[in-house]
Image (cartoon, rainbow, N blue to C red):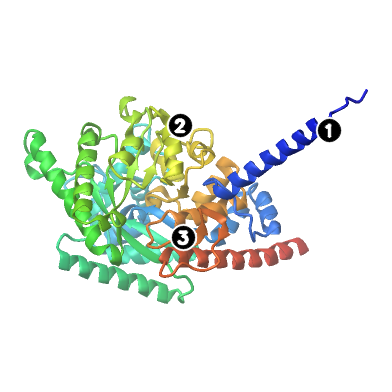
Amino acid sequence: MQKHIHPTAQRLHIVRHFFLLALLLLFYSGSASAGGSVEKDTSQQVAQYFESAKKNEAELVAFLHKMPKGADLHNHPWGAVYTETLLDSAIAQNLVFDRTTRSFVKETANPCYTAQELKQSNSKMGEVLSALSLRNQPKETENGHDHFFDSFGRFAAAVPSEESMLREQVGRAISQKIRYLELMTEPPREEEAVRSWLQQMGAARRETISQAGGAWNVDVAYIVPINRNALPDSLKNGPWNQEVYEEFFTQEVRQALTAIVRFSDQGIRSLTFLDPEDSWISRTQFAVQMRILDQEWRRLVAENPANADKLKVNLHAGELTLAYSPYEPMRNRISQSIALGHASRVGHGISIQWEDDVYGLLRQMRDYKTAVEICLTSNEGILNVAGGDKHPFRLYWDADVPVALCTDDEGISRSNLTMEYARAAQWFGLSYGHLKWLAFSSLEYSYLPGESFFINGDFNRPKTALPQGSAKAILEQQLRKDFQRFEADMEQNIRLMKSR
């Protein structure tokens, strides 16, 4: 028997539904999901092909290699140089490889390989390359974490000039359709030397782009790093003195932040801290480091409120697991890096699940658009955080926290940004629209100056006019055009493959 509904109740029922629908539409129009999908102007044919390409790594990599990728925001030049380049540099300098210390040196009394031997023996060359990178699984006596961080000291004597490293990295970026790099590298100390350094780096960048035909307007920004574990000579060679350490670290932070204020318009964008977070100094002095960073940041802003817009900070935070850290440091490592360290981006963020107020922190990061630099290959090689069931990517993504895929140290890790996108697609089941979102996100949360080209961070809603004088908006608009060309080309390629 059909139940009779009173007309008044029926009208109230309809009104209630329309009211709820209006609320949903209002919510959708007023907020954008950080973990979203770009559907506007996206080729459905290309999106469907991508789903099938994910089933085969060769097809997936071929697709992603040509896909525009926006930016790489977490990139260490020393770690980005491929170990073959370091090997060639060592041979050119006639260095020897000390097999005991597993490092390049000028001379040694230990068993070693000469430059001539390395030229002629594949097995000896392979031993060296494995010592300097994560290309093979580490031995049982040396895990990925220790192998990775030890690599820098092993190849330090063979590192080529910064200009040549920049040429290699920019060339790689151009070939992978990357439009912007933020490189964690330290300029000289003196102001005039900084200006000269910036000119040399700019010349090397322009030369590389010119050689590539100028097809891709790759930009480069430099980030001033501070070593978490750096010490003055008195502490290296003598007993620990807390007062001496704090005075030393204060001067390091002050000098770095001052450089950013002076040279932000010339490409020095941000401050970061280097060195492993699980080291003794990082672990015991973290609160001191955050206090000093907060103090110096506030001092410069008090001197000139306009400095607040220039003083960008992106801290390595939470690159920790229980294998390499006690439980206690992970309870606030990310939250304190944001609250006291003024980090507008955090690198890695692996330990987020151990934060005391994890869901409150995720809401805060979402609301204040504090982005996370996700480095999947690095996290797998160093921390053994591998696969979608172990990595916290989904915790950030599902909470609408902005994320950007980055390489970290692609030379040591034997990876590149193409493979970071491939891993993200396979590990987390991301669609083509999701990867487009990630590409735009990398530019949106970069330290490029100027307003965004998009409304409220929604990459489906471009502004009708380009914001005046915005370097960020220019690259974001160009990325949209890059995707249009890419999808048009892919549609032709798909038809070609289907015709065979």
Quadrant of the rendering where the N terminus is positioned:
top right
3 or 1: mark nearer the eye: 1
Relative depth, front residue between 1 and 12: 12
Classify mark 1: helix, strand or loop: helix
Q: Amino acid at mark 3?
A: Ser
In the image: residue 461, left or right of residue 171: right
Q: Amino acid at mark 2?
A: Tyr
Label drawn at residue 347: none
Classify mark 2: helix, strand or loop: helix
In the image: residue 145, left or right of residue 435: left
Label 3 CA crowd tier, 10 Å (few <14, some 14–19, many 20+): many
Please give the name of the residue rendered at 23% of the width and 48% of the height, measured from the top-left corner: 297
Relative depth, front residue between 193 and 444: 444
Report if residue 190 is visible in the image. yes
Residue under pointer 1: 7
Label drawn at residue 359: 2
Report if residue 105 is visible in the image. no
Contact (Cβ within 8 Å) of mark 1 with mark 2: no
Residue under pointer 3: 452
